[in-house]
Amino acid sequence: MKKVPNKKADSNSTMRKEYDFTGGVRGKHFKAMQAGYTITIHKTDGSKVIKEIKPSKEVISLEPDVQMYFPDSESVNTALRSLIRLIPAKKKTAVRKSQGLSSQSRVP
């Protein structure tokens, strides 16, 4: 006899009924992971390999609502490059002579 699928369950969901995340907190360990962590690998010969993992400073995280629009790094870079073109080139501003003089060197 075949099992009849539960029609109430979301057809896109692959979670089983026995999984309960009602007390779960999203991003609970995020800050700790960003600070770095250590992995200890126990080998069969009794030795240990310890690896320290630290996230690189070049890594940038996108919020989930932004990730919906950018499926990969290439699309993010393309969008940012198009925004960079819109930023006007910075002009070097001349420093006023009055700002460069201290109060002691001024002639009364």
Image (cartoon, grey):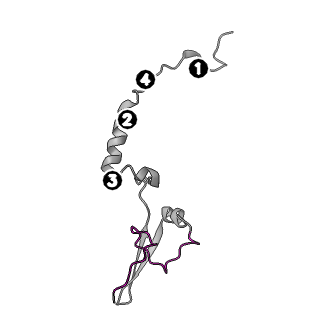
On the image, numbered disc 1 is attached to which residue? 99
Residue 98 location, quadrant: top right
> Where residue 89 sits: x, y (%)?
39, 27
Specify the quadrant that holds the N terminus.
bottom left
Q: Residues within 10 Å of mark 4 (few under 14, many from 20)?
A: few
User: Which of the pair 66/77 is nearer the observer?
Assistant: 66
Mark 2 / mark 3, whichever is N-terminal:
3
**What residue is disc 3 on?**
72
User: Which amino acid type corresponds to the residue marked 2 in the rendered image?
Assistant: Ile
Please tell me which of labels 4 and 2 falls first in the chain: 2
Numbered range of the magenta stretch: 2-24
Circle 1 or circle 2, nearest the eye: 2
What residue occupies the far top of the structure in this picture?
A: 108
Q: For the stretch drawn in magenta, what is the main secondary structure?
A: loop
Element under disc 3 = loop
Q: Nearer the viewer, residue 63 or 87?
A: 63
Q: Secondary structure at mark 2?
A: helix
Q: Residue under label 2, please give it.
A: 84
